[in-house]
Image (spheres, coloured by chain):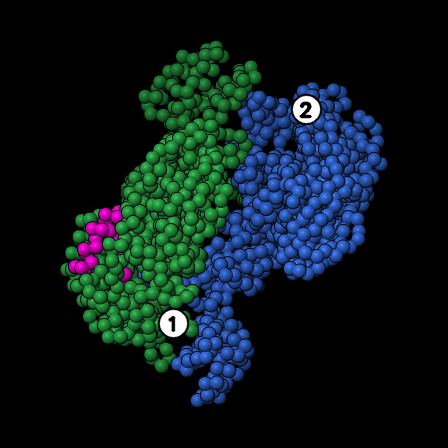
Chain colours: A blue, B green
Amino acid sequence: MAAAANALPRHFSRIVINQVTPQVEGGRWAAKATVGEQIPVRACVFTDGHQQLRVVARWRMLHRRGWTWTPLQGRIDDFWTGNLVFPEVGAAEFQIEAWRDAFGSWRSDYRRWLKVGVGPLEELPSGLEMVRQGLERLPSRERELIRRRLQDLQGASQARLERFLLSPDLYRLMERSLRARPGLRSEALPVWVERTRALYGAWYEMFPRSEGSRQRASGTFVSAAKRLPALAAMGFDVLYLPPIHPVGETARRGRNNAPRAEPGDPGSPWAIGSARGGHTAVNPELGDMDDFLAFQQQARDLGLELALDYALQCSPDHPWVKLHPNWFEHRPDGSIRTAENPPKRYDDVLPLDFECQDHAELWQACYEILEFWIERGVRIFRVDNPHTKPMLFWAWTIGRLRREHPEVILLAEAFTKPALMEELSKVGFSQSYTYFTWRTRKAELTSYMTQLSNRSADFLRPNFFTNTPDILTAELQAGGPPVFRERLVLAATLSPSYGIFSGFELFENQAREPRSEEYLDSDKYQFRQRDWRQAGPMADLITELNRIRRQHPALHQLRRIRFHSVADGRVIAFSKHTADRSDVVLVIVNLDPGAPRSARLTLSLSLLGIRPGASFRVHDLLQGGTEVWNGRRQLVRLGAEPAPALIYWVEP
Amino acid sequence: MAAAANALPRHFSRIVINQVTPQVEGGRWAAKATVGEQIPVRACVFTDGHQQLRVVARWRMLHRRGWTWTPLQGRIDDFWTGNLVFPEVGAAEFQIEAWRDAFGSWRSDYRRWLKVGVGPLEELPSGLEMVRQGLERLPSRERELIRRRLQDLQGASQARLERFLLSPDLYRLMERSLRARPGLRSEALPVWVERTRALYGAWYEMFPRSEGSRQRASGTFVSAAKRLPALAAMGFDVLYLPPIHPVGETARRGRNNAPRAEPGDPGSPWAIGSARGGHTAVNPELGDMDDFLAFQQQARDLGLELALDYALQCSPDHPWVKLHPNWFEHRPDGSIRTAENPPKRYDDVLPLDFECQDHAELWQACYEILEFWIERGVRIFRVDNPHTKPMLFWAWTIGRLRREHPEVILLAEAFTKPALMEELSKVGFSQSYTYFTWRTRKAELTSYMTQLSNRSADFLRPNFFTNTPDILTAELQAGGPPVFRERLVLAATLSPSYGIFSGFELFENQAREPRSEEYLDSDKYQFRQRDWRQAGPMADLITELNRIRRQHPALHQLRRIRFHSVADGRVIAFSKHTADRSDVVLVIVNLDPGAPRSARLTLSLSLLGIRPGASFRVHDLLQGGTEVWNGRRQLVRLGAEPAPALIYWVEP
């Protein structure tokens, strides 16, 4: 028993720090940030008894020396909050540090005595003693200054002593002295900082082969490049291309996913690999590597960054099938297993066996595909079906990318259940596809955005695509142009990253068959051509939205979105604001845009940074014009043009 | 790079396990359980791809060999759930274990092929191969059986092979084989298992000195013992006594907390210690140690367990002040600092300095106080103001108690902010006082109970006192007997542990001054006597409530409480049910009990275990009688007697 008692620490802290965020599973995974982003940091910090606390968040980039401090503000519930801003790409860490402020507590207690008219003489020596001890930790100049003051004050009156001990200058010095000793520190938590594009950007998806000049012939990088200026003019940041590699011949799919291709059918670009090469080759129908590089350079010159598809699967004609048959899964009879999801089979695609005997070689080869394209200037990859590969493979791949190519951005096509979708983001995907396309009603959108902007915001960055080559929702099929405009506004304003798949501008809404989300005559299985001259009105709206996005930092972030009350269940209203509320954007969208409607808003003025009773100016960002609003209740009218929505900038 | 690739593991799991509960800060603290309690366990378990999973929770008592398995049920959202039941007091741990079930997945895939009319011949060899590999992990008898079956089946028809591979018997054997190899295991999480009284019990608080026979003279253990049969008859389980130690003379407080005691005033029992002894002495006015032990034995014989107060502070006359002046905090002039919270001073109490130079000795001495009383049969302590002592002191104290006296129960008088209140429970207090007394409206009660029964239920067990010597709420002061009855029913049914402070039965509701929660003529500062003959009606209600509590296991638990919709905002309705729904209790309380009222309930029938459309019987547990209810909507009438409440047992 004596031994147990002796095992007590000589020094211990009476402070408790817990519930620190951002953190992902207790620090098992890094939280996410982008350069310059305001990352809210929060911790529950308290002590037994009544002493005052000083709390900071300290952080550093792992490849630099030295820590930076950000003071945190305490709330009545013992949570302390602030914002961290990381200056560059790379691995960072932060921790919470807290001190019990004995002198500050003494000072505040003494003031409470004074308030009831008693400055208890017997408390002054304690205050002086704290100053005497504290000055030892001050720089010599300040130390000497205070030492002399203390000498002067020997035998001074109570009033003079009080004046000295309660002075703000002394308090500032004592606080400096306090922080000169390490406080209690929480465990350091990892943060991975990416470039801004990982969080914020407008994406456009396009099959280059659909940008040809002749029906039933492949577009090329050369012909597709003619489309680039229009995309840049609309204000897109990223141009994502489905796989550009040679397409397999064996079991090639025909138009509209017919089991057998007709002569001339190009097949699905996701059936990667032929005698002409695999994941590091360019489909000769599109051109050669030089054509690709020229296309990329033209895009770059227009401010468009290219994103390639990273689809880890092979057509039966992929060179790996012969060179590395052991990288595929075999049946007992030695045949290679094709992709299947009973009762369906996909004979044109062979999945890789990430658990095969030689998986180290396979994983290395997969990584080398990324390196190959990175060497050729690609920095963004949209990853096909990541949820069918082992998490450990992604952890390993992303770990290497972060060390070797920290500027690379990966978008996870994680169309799977929430747990797995979130895990991929935790493991390190920069962005994720989401359920946005299927969240159409007000309650669904509200709860989904609340979750994305809070619970999972530390690790999952959404990219809201309005449509994809695989997803033409029932809502778009039935609703026509008004719904297209509504969904475009929602995607572009709810999420800092959003995208459209080409054809959306033309209101393409024909499904292959009833109850299917597949496009009729989908680009996936055939050459298509589109008459972009028809895209005018929608292109104008896209251009406007991307301009508004660029001009308003409130829309560059995932967090700090709040929903406002609207009497009409088919109208949604939300605002986004920057951390300092210097930019506040209010968006109101008609979710049933078949007809114009009026809506009664009840705004949460404090969320908009408006004092109760104050009048404030709002600027209509889509149609121009300024209004003066007064009070929380507003009646707004949602027309059809240019969109069934209103976007206001709320003047501070 | 080759090195990095070679660093890959040869074997790895494709399963992910996260979000395991119960867990307290990632396993830093033990979750709480009592013997036989149904503890819900939950984990998010999933894998990339489509393979089926088998998931169990395995647990053990640390002092026993061997693990027990509890299979978990999967839900669509990848959370797996079940219940753990621990059989004895002590430290336990559990972890989640999961396997990918390749054969089960093959079997289910094959059945999906069969559904569309194709049993693909080429899949049968894979199934047979899995059986061949799996049987190696079976006991020899079963292994030989299957081996012979496989030989018989050589060259058999597809139909025979299918019959064999899809048979339930084979599946059960293959599952056994699967589990013979360890699956992926989550980290083990700690659970501390206590006796039932840590969770469930009815408490009574009484000053023995108030149970005297003469005004202005101290009751004694002998005179107070006369009250024991009545307390036992009311069905109380625990009798808690404020400090029974000698009371200090210096700066003793007078009646109603007067700064100076009159001759004969007994002082606050929390000013512990005099020349007659400290924390291990009995106040001679109450009797001697033998009297205490006899009192305790009489209580025990009546089924009442005694709880003592553990108040770590000293009167200026406590023997420690002279023996161990270094255990107290000193001013620079050498004087000992009294308890203070500016602008108030409590001169009759000196706080201990838990950070003093000799804190190891002090902590040991504090522990020895507990040991002293434990040796004398006490197993429950109500801990005074634990939130003013270091958390590390409690962690150390409770750690030793758990090793040396695991049957001891500590109730934290943690009247402080939520973070600190919760931390004390995490550190290990068995129970905590709560904010119940100040949660009076329906929305407050609903949200507070929802939090207590969910978010903090893994570590914090509430004890709902209706009143304490320090807390006579404004609601009780103003509301009179109907509110006393309402609050009693709420306390006794919302929380498995509840208590009253003596006088509650007499509807004592006079405050010392306006806006004070202090009792007029409080037992804390004077001798009081009460005429228990006036307590009849309230004693009957208490007796009934404690009887109902005993008979209904649904009321012995904190979890599994759900609120039902009531049109009237001043009527609250909730039900509690056991994990298997064999016991379901429905409680409806008038929160504005000045007048009788009717209330329209809309019950969530599924919570009550009732099928939609079924009629069901409910038994009125307070007034007797049975009704047959039909449908979710019910009109109930809440009278005044015996309480402004209805308590129903819902027949399964």
Q: Does the magenta stretch include residue B239?
A: yes
Q: Which of A166 and B465 is in front in this view?
A: B465
Tell me the residue at 40%/30% (across/down). Answer: B628
B30 vs B117: above or below = below
Tell me the residue at 48%/66% (across/down). Answer: A53
Residue extent of the magenta highlight:
B220-243
B231 vs B365: above or below = above
Tell me the residue at 69%/19% (across/down). Answer: A260
Amino acid marked by disc 2: Pro
Residue B224 % position (x, y) = 20, 58
- Binning the other alpha carbons within 10 Å of mark 1 as few (below 14), some (14 to 19) or many (20 upward) gives some
Q: Residue B260, can we see it?
A: yes
Secondary structure beneath disc 1? strand
Residue B229 % position (x, y) = 20, 51
| Residue hosting label 2 | A514
Q: Residue A576, can we see it?
A: no
- Disc 2 to disc 1, C-alpha distance: 77 Å
| Residue hosting label 1 | B340
Circle 1 marks a residue in which chain?
A: B
Q: Nearer the viewer, residue B139 or A561?
A: A561
Q: Count of labels shown? A: 2
Residue B546 % position (x, y) = 30, 45
Residue extending farthest front: B595
Amino acid marked by disc 1: Glu
Residue B48 % position (x, y) = 53, 35
Q: Is residue B411 left or right of residue A522?
A: left
Tell me the residue at 35%/45% (across/down). Answer: B641
